[in-house]
Image (cartoon, rainbow, N blue to C red):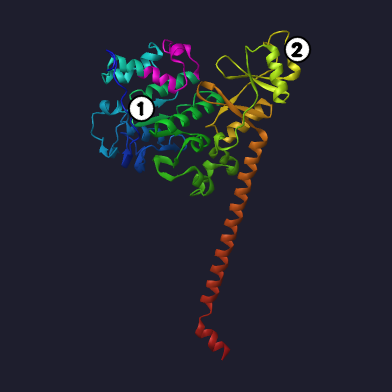
């Protein structure tokens, strides 16, 4: 029996299909619709990214799914149910929504922000409390440290994590995300993208994500919808298909130069060799650290902080200069990557850190291993070689097609009867 005020954990919901049929939005006084006749189907548990130029209608299309903007025409079905005429407030309580700059209420604590929708749905207080703890842990924030803070006491990245936790708190099957990471610095943005990929692997929600950044779309999307003006769909396909076979010049413009290198965003750190590396704790005695260096047969160890997170690279020669303390010895770890980070993220981190390797972390930044520049460069060369091979095969196919066409044209210019008469 559960204790008074608590409930047994309910099974988690999974993603639901989203069907848009002829979805249109026309504003009064405008000579043409802002969104014109959008029809698409998004699979349950799929992450679909809308990308397109500013003003093309991608955010308007997203907001019509949860009816923050009312459509002028068309139908919306979620999980097979037509929600076009449903009470919009009731609909929004069943759909998670995360926006740029988190949208947290400044007068509420982190816990109160996350609990907002569950309380509206009249969940028992014990279940709400448990859900807040679960959500904070899920997005990598220590509940004891963060539940009672206010948004102003959080970094931009922490605010965005809380925003995602709030969007997921009522366990919705669908999560809408409108440029949620656009207001944070590039390093934090990479980590938030990795966190979203990890969460999606665990939760299997249906995610519709709006961005203007094609690299971000490649990294997180199962499929990408490249949108023209009025949300007309230029191409709706997998990242691989769009990179290797853009539908037209408009899509090619979004792909931009260096398509082969952009494919680094399709391969995860977890797909290559992540190796272990000698580690010591920040509070370990210096003689134990020296012994660890000798037994490992290396000139360097990775120092972990009290929470098991990468802290410093410590070389053998640094120990002589410690003067009994690690405070001034070694080189601080400036950046880390997760297993869900892309090879491009890892390569940038390696080049920025200038150590020839980057530490790989898991939940709450705990150390899991390292990936080195040699492994990354080998992967880059393999991708480039695969692209060259594909290009050669494509060129050979085109030449064969032209040869066949030329042969057919020559045959057509000289019918068999004509050739016979000429020979006669």
Residue situated in front as seen by the camera: 408 or 128: 128
Find the magenta span and give its range: 131-156
Residue 313's x, y, as percent? 67, 20
**Is residue 254 shown in magenta?**
no
* Residue picked out by circle 2: 321
Residue 413's x, y, as percent? 53, 77
Indicate the quadrant where residue 304 lies. top right
Residue situated in front as seen by the camera: 383 or 225: 383
Dominant secondary structure, magenta: helix
Indicate the quadrant where residue 104 lies. top left
Up/down of 276 relative to 311, above or below: below
- Mark 2 and mark 1 lie on one chain; the one further toward the N terminus is 1
Q: Where, quadrant-wise, is the N terminus in this rendering?
A: top left
Residue 164's x, y, as percent? 42, 24
Residue at the spot 52% in from the left edge and 72% down from the top edge:
408
- Tell me how many marks there are: 2
Residue situated in front as seen by the camera: 308 or 108: 308
Determine which of the numbered discs, if any, sits on residue 245 in the image. Answer: none
């Amino acid at each position: 029996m559960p204790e008074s005020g608590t409930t047994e954990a309910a099974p988690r919901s999974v993603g639901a299909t989203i069907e848009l049929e002829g979805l249109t939005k026309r504003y009064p006084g405008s000579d043409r619709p802002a969104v014109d006749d959008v029809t698409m189907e998004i699979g349950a548990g799929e992450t679909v990214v809308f990308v397109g130029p500013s003003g093309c209608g991608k955010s308007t299309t997203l907001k019509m799914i949860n009816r923050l903007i009312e459509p002028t025409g068309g139908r919306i079905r979620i999980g097979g149910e037509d929600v076009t005429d449903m009470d919009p407030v009731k609909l929004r309580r069943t759909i998670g929504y995360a926006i740029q700059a988190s949208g947290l209420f400044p007068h509420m604590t982190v816990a109160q922000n996350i609990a907002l929708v569950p309380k509206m749905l009249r969940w028992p207080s014990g279940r709400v409390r448990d859900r807040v703890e679960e959500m904070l842990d899920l997005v990598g924030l220590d509940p004891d440290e963060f539940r009672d803070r206010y948004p102003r006491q959080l970094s931009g990245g922490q605010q965005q994590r809380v925003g995602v936790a709030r969007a997921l708190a009522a366990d919705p099957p669908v999560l809408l995300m409108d440029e949620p990471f656009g207001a944070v610095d590039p390093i934090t943005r990479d980590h938030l993208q990795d966190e979203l990929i990890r969460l999606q692997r665990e939760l299997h929600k249906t995610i519709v994500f709006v961005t203007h950044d094609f690299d971000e779309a490649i990294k997180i999307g199962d499929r990408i919808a490249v949108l023209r003006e009025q949300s007309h769909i230029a191409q709706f396909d997998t990242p691989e298909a769009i990179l290797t076979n853009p539908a037209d010049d408009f899509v090619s413009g979004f792909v931009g130069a260096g398509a082969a290198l952009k494919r680094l965003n399709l391969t995860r750190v977890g797909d290559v060799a992540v190796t272990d590396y000698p580690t010591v704790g920040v509070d370990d005695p210096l003689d134990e650290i020296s012994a660890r260096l000798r037994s490992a047969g290396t000139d360097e160890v990775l120092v972990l902080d009290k929470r098991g997170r990468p802290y410093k690279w410590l070389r053998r020669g640094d120990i002589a200069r410690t003067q009994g303390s690690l405070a001034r010895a070694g080189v601080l770890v400036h950046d880390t990557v997760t297993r869900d980070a892309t090879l491009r993220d890892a390569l940038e981190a390696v080049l920025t850190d200038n150590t020839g390797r980057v530490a790989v972390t898991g939940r709450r930044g705990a150390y899991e291993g390292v990936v080195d520049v040699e492994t990354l460069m080998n992967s880059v060369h393999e991708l480039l070689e695969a692209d060259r091979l594909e290009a050669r095969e494509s060129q050979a196919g085109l030449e064969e097609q032209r040869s066949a066409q030329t042969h057919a044209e020559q045959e057509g210019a000289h019918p068999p009867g004509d050739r016979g008469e000429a020979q006669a």
